[in-house]
Amino acid sequence: MTQSTTATAGNPPASPTQIQSTLDSLEIVPRPRIWSILGAAAVIVIVVGAIWDIITNERFGWGTVLEYLFNPQILSGVGLTLILTVVSMTIGILLGIVLAIMRLAKNPTFSTVARGYIWFFRGTPLLVQLIFWYNIAALYPVIALGLPFGGPSIPIGEANVLITPLTAALLGLALNEAAYMAEIIRSGIQSVDEGQRDAGRAIGMTESKLMLRVVLPQAVRIVVPPTGNQVISMLKGTSLVSVLAISDLLYSAQIIYALNYQTIPLLLVACVWYLAMTSVLTAIQGRLEARYGKGFQPRRQVKAKKQKEAVA
C-alpha cells in the first residue's frame, strides 16, 4: 500500500546510500548551555589571573631569565640534550625492532630472552640504570672479549676509560628505551591483519621479506603516535643524566645558579627550552600522524577536511 502510494506520487523510496548521504550533509549545531558558558568564563578568569600573577611576581626574576636564555653554556646544554635524545632514540628503536621480532618468534629461546630483557629494563628505574652503568668498572675493571666459563679472552681496555659518563648515559637511555619500543613495535606488528601475511606467503615471500616489505610498513601507522610520545619522554628524561655530571641543559643551568644563586630563574630558562623543543617535536609528530593516517580517517573528518579545502 505504501509502496504503491509512493510510486503513484512519483517519489520512489530512497536507497540506503541516499539516506546516508543526506545524513552526512546535515550539520548539527549544539544549543548553548548557560552552565557551560559560566564554567568556561570562570576557567578563563582563573587562568588569566594565574598568568597575571606569574608575570607580575618579581621573585620569578624574568629579567634574569631573559639574560641567560641564550647564554652560550645553556645553548651548549641544549645541543647535548638533543644529541642524547637523537642517538638514544635511534639505538632504542633499532634494538626495539629486534626485540619485538624476537618476542613474537616461535623459537622459545628468542621469545624468552626478549621477555627477560623487557621485564628487567622496564622493571627498574632509569636513574638506577644510569648510575649502574656509570659504576660498571666496579664489576668489570677491564672490558674484554672472550669465551664464557673462564675461556680465553682478549682485553679491549679499562672500563673507566671506555665507559665515560657520556657513554654511560647513552647506554642507560638507549637500553632502557629499547624495552619500551619493543612493546610498542610488537603491538604495531600484531595489529596488521593476518590476511596480509597470508597474501605475502601466497606469492612466495620469505618470513624476513614479509616482515620488511608487508608487516612493518603497515605497522608504522600504529607505531608513530606512541613513538612520538616516547621521543618527547626521552627528551625530558635526558635531564636525569645531570647526576652523572654531564653538561646537558639541566646541568648547565645548575652550574650557573650554583654560582649566582638565581635558582628559580635558571630553572625557568631550562623549562623554556624544554617546552620549545617538545613543542617542535609535537608538531612533527602531528605531521607524521597525518601522513601515515591517510585513508584511515573517519568519514566525518574526511568530509570536514574537504569542506575546509573547498572554502580555502
Image: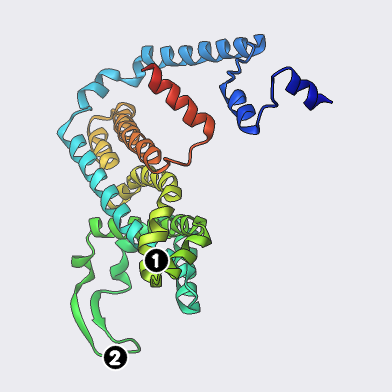
| Place of residue 277 in the rendered image (x, y in percent of width and height, measured from the top left) | 30, 35
Q: Within 10 Å of the Cα at label 1, are there few (<14), some (14-19), or many (20+) other Cα atoms? A: some
**107 sits left or right of 216 in the view:** right
Q: Residue at x 44, y 62 (%)?
A: 121
Q: Nearer the viewer, residue 268 or 294?
A: 294
**Quadrant of residue 11 within the rendered picture:** top right
| Place of residue 180 in the rendered image (x, y in percent of width and height, measured from the top left) | 44, 56
The residue where tag 2 is placed is: 151
The residue where tag 1 is placed is: 210
Q: Earlier in the sequence, mark 2 or mark 1?
A: 2
Amino acid at circle 2 = Gly
Q: Residue at x 21, y 27 (%)?
A: 68
Q: Nearer the viewer, mark 2 or mark 1?
A: 1
Is residue 248 depicted above or below 13 in this figure? below
Q: Residue at x 25, y 18 (%)?
A: 63
Is residue 120 depicted above or below 108 in this figure? above
**56 sits left or right of 184 in the view:** left
Colouring scheme applied when the structure was drawn? rainbow
Q: Quadrant of the N terminus?
A: top right
**Quadrant of residue 99 within the rendered picture:** bottom left
Q: Nearer the viewer, residue 234 or 59?
A: 234
**84 sits left or right of 205 in the view:** left
**Quadrant of residue 256 within the rendered picture:** top left
Element carrying mark 1: helix
